[in-house]
Image (cartoon, rainbow, N blue to C red):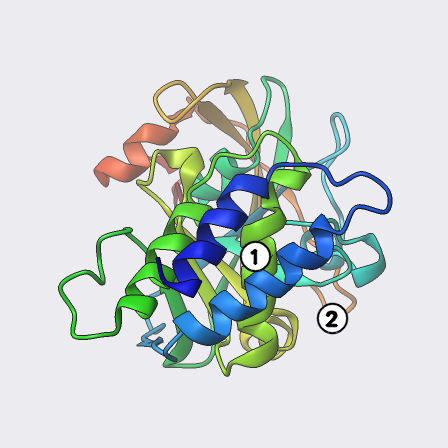
Amino acid sequence: MSQIQADIDFLLSVSRAKPKPGDETGQLISAALIRVFKEGYNGNHSRYPTEDLALHRGRIGPPGQLYEKLSDLWYPPSQFSKQGRAHLSGESLLYCAAGSATAILELRPKRGDIICMMEGRVEKSPLLTKMIMDEQLYDPLSISEESKAFERFIAKEFRRVPNGPRDYLICGALGSLFFKFTSIEAIMYTSMATDLAGVNFAFAAPIADKFLKPTKFRAYEVVAAGGLAECQVRCRAHAGAASADGTIPWEQISQCSGHRLSEAFLRKPGTCDGTRNPT
């Protein structure tokens, strides 16, 4: 067995284990991750075109309220950042989805939740992106066996369904390594919340601050919760660009018959008060 495969097997066996105080498992995990990354990643990435890319970021608001400031929908400051899919605690990334339906489902909302959604555009093309896709995508390519093992490993980790923050231990550390030691500007990965029908992006904070420009906003009420087939929302408010001080100029939507999120993946958008429904 190769060293990289031995390290991967070790990481898969302990990634959900909680080390006891004084246990050296944490140090062993860190060392194995660095070895796997150095030996397996061959530098491949994509120059992703962004001209037609609309990105969405949602957040569940306080009961019955809408977030009033753009900053409420941006990434949290590092001191409040908990471990996530592509980062470790204390690191700031801006997570978005290619479509508001995906962004809503990623929140795992409950019936009655009010979701405030920001839509934005990336004012940089191409975007240097690490695409984490199917586990077998790299098998037919002329790359080393170590690189193939690495790509299969990260694809498996980024598709793991989490039961808690600790379940992001390995993929979060891998994402952190990508942003710290390579030139990539974003990680693109398929959405588990949409049964792999949607796509998510994780942006390095400086890239998001410089190039991601919010364009409009919409608020939804969740009227039926569940997975992709069950979730339904009703539009509650919309807004254009935020004002100079970051205030979101919400306007109420008085009529909306509701939207099934599954229709977004069938390319069947609806309308609300004469404006195109972004889901």
Residue 103 shown left or right of residue 246 in the figure: left
Q: Is residue 47 visible?
A: yes
Which image quadrant for residue 116?
top right
Q: Which residue is drawn at 45% across and 48% down?
A: 9
Question: Where 275 sits versus 49, above or below?
Answer: above
Label 1 vs 2, first from the N-terminus? 1
Residue 26 shown left or right of residue 14 in the figure: right
Q: Residue at x 53, y 49 (%)?
A: 11
Q: Which amino acid does label 1 sit on?
A: Ala
* Image quarter (top left, top right, bottom left or bottom right) of the N terminus: bottom left
Q: Can residue 132 be seen in this view?
A: no
Q: Name the residue under label 2.
A: 244
Q: Which amino acid does label 2 sit on?
A: Ala
Instruction: Give the CA separation, mark 1 to mark 2.
Output: 31 Å
Q: Nearer the viewer, residue 56 or 139?
A: 139
Q: Nearer the viewer, residue 238 or 214?
A: 214
* Residue 188 x/y as whole percent: 41, 60
Q: Residue at x 44, y 34 (%)?
A: 193
Q: Mark 1 points at which residue?
A: 86
Residue 17 shown left or right of residue 182 in the figure: right
> Disc 1, disc 2: CB below 8 Å?
no
* Residue 134 x/y as whole percent: 27, 51
Which is closer to the viewer, label 1 or label 2?
1
